[in-house]
Amino acid sequence: RGLGDVYKRQHLAGSVNINFLGENFPQEISNLNKNKTYLLYCKSGNRTRKAADQMQKAGFKHVYMLQGGITAWNEAGKPVEK
């Protein structure tokens, strides 16, 4: 299964899927407003740190990470969209 499949099965309300491992990641984040606040997450949290580092290096000021990813979110009983 691809990373997009995980997003399709469940994601946080209002979230947008940008594949950190995709070759277009730098171009995709360049279209985002660097002054807005972003909460990053993946399935378990492993890719989130790398994505946050790239965004901060690109000039994003307000980047936060969901510790433990959507897996921890689910374990805490928090809501997701399917």
Image (cartoon, rainbow, N blue to C red):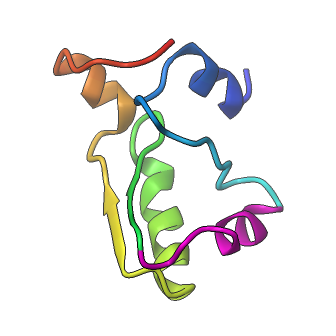
Q: Position of residue 29 (x, y in %)?
A: 65, 67
Stretch of the chain drawn in magenta:
24-35
Q: Position of residue 75 (x, y in %)?
A: 22, 18
User: Is residue 49 toward the left or the right of residue 2 in the image?
Assistant: left
Q: Identify the residue at horizontal 58%, vertical 27% (top origin).
A: 7
In the picture shown, does residue 66 fall above or below 43? Answer: below
In the picture shown, does residue 47 fall above or below 50? Answer: above
Question: Which residue of the protein is positioned furthest toward the right in this rendering?
Answer: 23
Q: Identify the residue at horizontal 46%, vertical 33% (top origin).
A: 43
To which quarter of the image does residue 31 belong?
Answer: bottom right
Q: Position of residue 18 (x, y in %)?
A: 65, 49
To which quarter of the image does residue 13 belong?
Answer: top left
> Closest to the observer: 8 or 44?
8
User: Is residue 38 toward the left or the right of residue 18 in the image?
Assistant: left
Question: Which residue of the protein is positioned furthest toward the left in this rendering?
Answer: 76
User: Is residue 15 toward the left or the right of residue 77 in the image?
Assistant: right
Q: Assign the N terminus to one quadrant of the image.
A: top right
To which quarter of the image does residue 24 belong?
Answer: bottom right
Is 34 contained in the magenta span?
yes
